[in-house]
Amino acid sequence: MKYKTAVVVFNSILYPSEKKQKRKTKIHLAKFIKPEVDRKLLEEANSIVSIVCGTDKIAWAHLSRGLSVLDWQQESCQSFMKGGYLASAYLDDISSVVSRIPAADLFVVEKAGLSLQHTSLYPVMVHLRTVEAMLFALLGPRREPEDPPKVLNMMRTAVGRHFGLMVGETRTSGVQTVRQMMTDSATQKTPRVSFPHNLLVRYRNAFQLGARNRGEELCDSLLQAVAFYELLSE
């Protein structure tokens, strides 16, 4: 961590109350949706599928406008970042994922921002952009140039800011936030997000703090969908 980032981290640990009291910066959804589309298109989406790509898997969350979880899964992709890049292998893995993704009014794919200054992350960036491009091609039906798109990007940093997960310019884990949402769904009459019982049972032990694989992509796909609708309603 650089000096300024370290100061932010240590202050948030030493003075957590001050962080809660800070006024939340208002985020405009349209600014973080690409390509730019008519706001009416976003408002008319009764359900969306939020998709997040990792280095070895793809996760998706299907949510309704009322923030009810309709589907929430992930699938491992054996060809991702293993050996030499083979387009046909990537296409096979991603096509398998797309065949399982449910129909929705819009598909929202996470746009991760990676700094070009970190040259060690260049292979990851190329991988994510490749998967992103294939998802756009496979999920988006053929359309005329004037037709609105069904596949959109949402900036990862916008979701992080919405849930208070940003430390400086770095996005931290959303596992704790998702665990709290699941707990609230099981214990409250009007939770922020409603999960079906079968998904609560399936994932009740999936997000253990300190575990090697905590299901970050699963968490991020859910948070992106929630942020989409909550920012849209502001």
Image: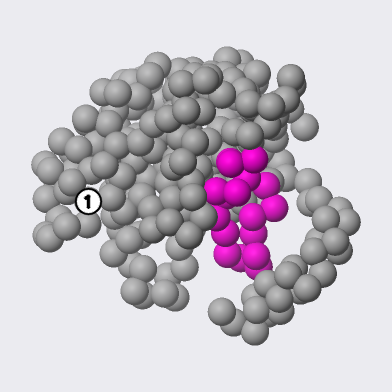
Q: Which residues are magenta?
A: 163-180
Is 138 included in the stretch rendered in magenta? no
Instruction: Please name the residue that numbered disc 1 is placed on.
Output: 80
Quarter the N terminus occupies: bottom right
- x and y percentages locating residue 55 in the rendered image: 31, 53
Q: Secondary structure at mark 1?
A: loop
Is 176 included in the stretch rendered in magenta? yes
Residue visible at 33% across and 67% down in the picture: 122
The quarter of the picture where residue 180 lies is top right
In the image, residue 136 sits, relative to residue 32, either above or below, namely: above
Residue visible at 72% across and 45% down in the picture: 27
Q: How is the image coloured?
A: one colour
Residue visible at 57% across and 59% down in the picture: 172
| Residue positioned most to the bottom | 3
- x and y percentages locating residue 100 in the rendered image: 30, 23
Which amino acid, mark 1? Phe
- x and y percentages locating residue 54 in the rendered image: 36, 50
The quarter of the picture where residue 203 lies is top left
